[in-house]
Image (tube, grey):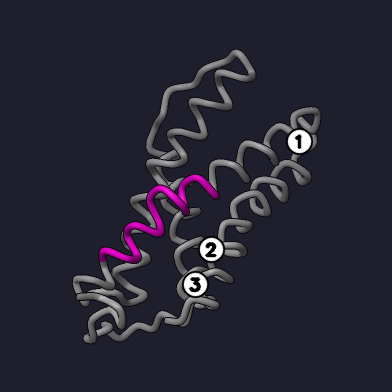
Amino acid sequence: MDDRRLILATVFAPLIVPAVFLAFQLLSADNRSAIFLVAFFSTATAYVGTLVIGLPVVYGLRRARMLNLLSLALAGAAGGVIMFFVFSLFLGFVLESSAPFDLLQALWGGTLGLLVSLAFGALAGITWRSSGRPDAGAA
């Protein structure tokens, strides 16, 4: 995995989250008024999740020589649940409403995290095989 591909993956993979949210928002006829708010918060949450959870996980897995698409996807699904919870809190605060975080929301978060991590892995050149070599610059 070279740095150019890592940057490419970091820039483009999180865009899956707002794309999914916008698609569902546009397909539903009931609440289009919040579309820009949803787009903003889902984009911000996706990038924060990638930078705060995703990249440290990638570097940790690579350092432990366990970086492969499966481990990345599992970590991405778990991170997605966490970030969906955070997204729900922020959106509820802004819209002055609240809903309990339930299994369906956890599944949504896990699915979005899985999709982002798979896209990230594909863009970064991470394969299904475990990377059995250490970091090039590690001491």
Label 2 or label 1, whichever comes before in sequence order: 2
Q: Nearer the viewer, residue 100 or 73?
A: 73
Mark 2, secondary structure of its residue? helix
Is disc 2 in contact with disc 3, using a CB cutoff of under 8 Å?
yes
The kind of residue tagged 3 is Leu
Image coords of residue 118 (percent x, y): 47, 69
**Is disc 3 surrounded by few (<14), some (14 to 19) or many (20+) residues within 10 Å?**
some
Residue 102 vertical position relative to residue 116 in the rendered view, above or below: above
The kind of residue tagged 2 is Thr
Residue 35 vertical position relative to residue 133 in the rendered view, above or below: above
State which region is magenta: 47-60
- In the rendered image, residue 53 lying in the magenta stretch gets the answer yes
Q: Give the residue displayed 21% in from the left and 77% down from the top.
A: 65
Image coords of residue 89 (percent x, y): 48, 25
Magenta segment main secondary structure: helix
Q: Give the residue displayed 75% in from the left and 40% down from the top.
A: 28
Question: Quarter of the image holding residue 26?
Answer: top right
Label number found at residue 65: none
Q: Residue furthest toward the top?
A: 96
Label number found at residue 10: 2
Q: Residue tagged by mark 3?
A: 6
